[in-house]
Image: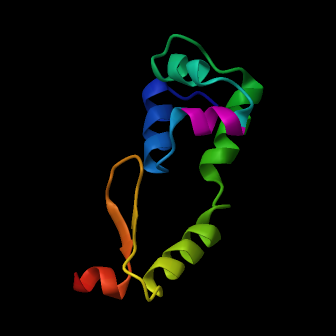
Amino acid sequence: MTISGSGIRRMRLLRSMKQQHLAELLGINQATVSRWEQDQLSLSPQQAVRLERIFSSSQHAAADTALKRLVEDSVRPVHLICDVSHRLLSASRPRQAE
C-alpha cells in the first residue's frame, strides 16, 4: 500500500482523529505521524497495513451511536462538541430549547 502524507492526514481528519491518538493506536510517537503527513518519513509495509486497518475499521461506530443517543435522550441541557472541529454533534432537547 502506498499512501501519501496528505492522504494520511485527510483520512485522519475525516475520522476526527488527532495525531496523538493515531500514534497511540499504532504504538508510535506523534512526531512520526507528523513526519509521515509532511512526507518526511515513509511508512514501513507493516505500518501501512496497520494504518489501513485503522482507517477501514468501523469499531467506534456503535460507541459513537450510543454516545449520541445518550446525549439526545438526556433530560439535562447537554451537548456534544467535536474536539477537533468544534462542530456541534448532538444536543439534548432541553439544550435545543435554550
- In the current view of this chain or complex, which residue is farthest to the front? 76
Give coordinates of residue 9: x percent, y percent.
Answer: 46, 33
Along the line of sight, which residue is nearer the eye, 67 or 35? Answer: 67
Figure quadrant of the C terminus: bottom left
Residue 46 appears at what percent x and percent y?
Answer: 77, 28
Q: Which residue occupies 31% across, 80% down?
A: 95
Q: In the figure, is residue 6 to the left or right of 66?
A: left
Give whichever of 60, 39 is nearer the camera.
60
Magenta region includes residue 10: no
Q: Looking at the image, which residue is at 46% across and 49% down?
A: 16
- The overriding secondary structure of the stretch rendered in magenta is helix
The number of callouts visible is: 0
**The residue stretch that appears in magenta:** 20-25
Image-based side of 7 in relation to 67, left or right: left
Q: Is residue 98 left or right of residue 29?
A: left
Picture quadrant of residue 58: bottom right
**Measured along the vertical axis of the image, is residue 75 above or below residue 49?**
below
Q: Residue at x 27, y 82 (%)?
A: 96
